[in-house]
Image: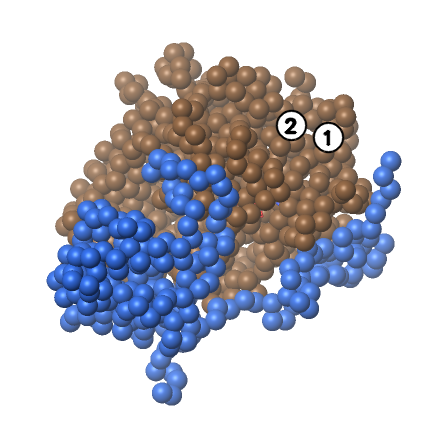
Chain colours: A brown, B blue
Amino acid sequence: MARRLPRRDVVIVGLGWTGAILAHELTDAGYDVVAIERGPWRDTATDFNVGYMPDELRYAIRQDLFLKPAQETFTFRNNTTQTALPIREFGSFLPGNGVGGAGVHWNGHTWRFFPSDFNLKSHLDQRYGPGFVHKDLQVQDWGFTYDEIESAYDRFEYLAGISGKAGVLKGQVQTGGNPFEGPRARDYPLPPMKMTLAPTMFAQAAQGIGLHPFPTPSANLSGAYVNPLGIAMGECTYCGFCERFGCSNYSKSSAQTTILPLLMRKSNFEARTLCEVTRVNMHPTGKHATGVTYVDVNGEEFEQPADLVLLCAYGLHNVRLMLLSKIGQSYDPNTGEGTVGRNYCYQTNSGVQLFFDDKIFNPFIAAGSLGQTVDDYNGDAFDHTGKDFVGGAGINCIPTNGRPISFRPVPPGTPRWGSAWKKATKDNYLRAFGFSSQGSSYAIRGNYLDLDPTYKDRFGNPLMRMTFDFPDNDIRMSNWVTDRMQEIAKALNPRQAVVSRRTKPYNIVPYQSTHNTGGAIVGADPKTSPLNRYLQSWDVHNVFAIGASAFPQNAGKNPTGTVGALAYWAADAIIQKYMRNPGPLVQA
Amino acid sequence: MTHDAAPPVSVTRRRFLASTAAIAVLASAGGRAHAASLSGILPWQPYSATPPTPVVPGGWTFFTPAEARAVEAIVDRLIPADDVSVGGKDAGCAVFIDRQLSGSYGSAQNLYMQPPFANGTPSQGFQSPLSPTGRYRQGLAGLDAYCKANFAGKSFDGLSPAEQDDLLKKMEANGIKFESGDAKSLFELLLQNTMEGFFADPIYGGNKDMVSWRMIGFPGARYDYRDHIDKHNQPYPLPPVSIMGNSTWVRR
Ligand SMILES: Cc1cc2nc3c(=O)[nH]c(=O)nc-3n(C[C@H](O)[C@H](O)[C@H](O)COP(=O)(O)OP(=O)(O)OC[C@H]3O[C@@H](n4cnc5c(N)ncnc54)[C@H](O)[C@@H]3O)c2cc1C
Ligand code: SF4
């Protein structure tokens, strides 16, 4: 029997990026908030200790900070004709675990999506005529516009001290920024980071062929910064142990470096760590939630009653908790009915590796988001008339590290061991770099999430099943963008350029990105989205699900800038509208 | 109606406590993890960091003497001694693998190991019910039986370097079958772990004297490159350091 605890105003599931933002906003508004986090407490001085943080084996290879599959994993198959099998070892994506969530060990590329990404379906219909978007693609509008969340983007960027250069300031294009971005009210809080050689050469080459490179907006700070909460951060030292690692320098934005020092001191906030939420409890009417049930690290079960339940558990876990708790109806790809698990999307990437004879790149002088991007072929920044696809990709030259267990570029055909391998490894280590495309991922009927019929977690609850392969539209898009990348590669004039194209089937083993989106999407119609435009469940009004799970489809950009904006957008709706008059914020 | 029971740890009633109230229950005396309730303060405890334990060479913690001889011979073919660097054995790769197998990596403690096990497609990833220790034990037994049957009773370490290379190439190309274990997957595991040992921080037993880092020019755990970020196309001047420091800093 679960022990029943005293009621709280708000219970937050997960204390990562979104959980920390929501907790801060709601405690400031005077509510009594408890966050329940299944991983451990973590902080810079103890857990991201400079004395032993630069350890590739422990953190990057053995994945010390990530969720362990023994605790929870997913099952996976490429399509419904296959039997899904458990992901026994994480590879393609690496969910976080512990206070700070995946925000502890992210790279820090911090993007705004294009305005046309938000009203995508109506935008494409209007620009190219109805019927241009292939009928198999379940492309949808978000239910709100870029202009409506511009200020929420701004708040996240100023919270996190993002280093970058505005491209469009109050409607005016700025030199040196991204000319394709939506208009912003003010510039980034910090100037761009200093560039290393590889992205500098990439930018010159791209500019030389008429493209518009700009410094990638980065949560690795270019200088000292005090954020609006009064929390100070330091300058990035280009340590090259960034993604997959915590930052020892207080230079990478995360809940730890931007929110927790203030949040943890508030008397109306409590964090419970090493406690895993197993379900949202429902009132017998099924119309509202009564709180959550969780199990602590010693296996004891508790019930935490609350008036408002916020799922901030990372997109995939939000969807699983909704499925386990029967909040909304599970999506069925055969009938197209049900909405929870619908429109699961990912990211469609490809890469080019370049080898030189006469250059020294010092790949170890690097940071998680130090680089240059070209957005000329992203989203709908270019004319798709006559093309056989929609969507696009950002082209990024962001060499993040020279950690040698995994970074050892050698030309194709080199043996994998022996003296010839060793010589090639020595000769090329300093003399190669790569750039990659990060492409949009659009939903199709057969890509979805549901509960697995066979495999269970350690509590006996079903694992979530992921059914996914790259849609043909996205493969065509990626191939076309990869052709453009070859033009940039040619302009760089390397000794050799090696292209890796995106091919089917999607493989769960090699790392691609922890950008799992959809499954609990926002929208204007309860038949095609489980959440309304405020990230509130259409069916259960006191449950909100915040994360990339809310994206109807994914853009050719990393998600967290938009996830952070959605957190502020939802917080405003909750504080200004919902708490004053609890109930559905949008009438179905 | 159920009545409200006591909260899991003592301070959920921090509302009624002074604003400085702080309770952080992070670990019990027995070292067993406890759920913690954290409120009113940014928690911090002395000695709560978890540095790695340096590997001490000497002896074997997982391999039998015969297995160790085979693995030492293999790592010395994967990374042969030549004019570029010492070989895998002298770099400590076999010791590295032995110690890794004795820890949480070897037992697959962190992986999802629940049945049912089935052979999936390559895109579904690793599906073996065996942990790395099991894969080594089975695979090395298979390799030994294969060598004894095909090389007049000799074990792998008794073969000539050319014979060893030839056999490893066949394993890599999936060209031979072992009685126990899968030759190709043993090869892949050995290659992966040998490279890990050669390029990881020396604290784990391989990469002796940072040999691989000096070979390629990786400065290791330096952590601050602000003085070199603007120096494009110029070699980095300083030698590598490990998280244990630099071997020249200690008296031998
Ligand atoms: C290696 C890596 C690199 C990345 N790089 C980038 C990048 O450059 N740019 C970018 O935009 N994004 C990047 N990301 C993604 C980014 O980290 C996430 O988008 C972001 O952290 C999502 O925030 P969130 O609040 O939704 O989830 P998280 O920050 O992961 O927080 C979720 C929290 O919920 C907890 N939780 C989950 N389930 C439960 C449960 N049942 N009970 C209790 N607690 C639970 C988790 O332990 C976790 O702490 C990267 C991710 C990784 C892993
Ligand atoms: S690269 Fe910069 S931001 Fe990243 S971990 Fe190192 S110091 Fe921190």
Residue A300's spot in the image, x, y percent?
Answer: 71, 49
Identify the mark at residue A282; answer none if there is no mark.
1
Residue at the far bottom in the pictured view:
B251
Could you tell me if the residues under marks 1 and 2 are in contact, i.e. CB atoms within 8 Å? Answer: yes
Q: CA distance from mark 1 to mark 2?
A: 9 Å
* Figure check: A321 above or below B172: above
Are discs 1 and 2 located on one and the same chain? yes
* Residue B133 visible from this viewpoint: yes
Residue A4's spot in the image, x, y percent?
Answer: 80, 43
Q: Is residue A416 left or right of residue A124?
A: left
Chain to which the residue tagged by mark 1 belongs? A
Q: Amino acid at mark 1?
A: Met
* Figure check: B251 above or below A550: below
Residue B209's spot in the image, x, y percent?
Answer: 31, 75
User: Residue beneath label 2, please?
Assistant: A326
Q: Amino acid at mark 2?
A: Lys
Q: How many neighbours does mark 1 have within 10 angstroms: few (below 14), some (14-19), or many (20 or more)?
A: some
Q: Depth check: A319 or A87 in front?
A: A87
Residue at the far top in the pictured view:
A130
Tell me which label, 1 or 2, sits earlier in the chain: 1
Q: Depth check: A432 or A333 in front?
A: A333
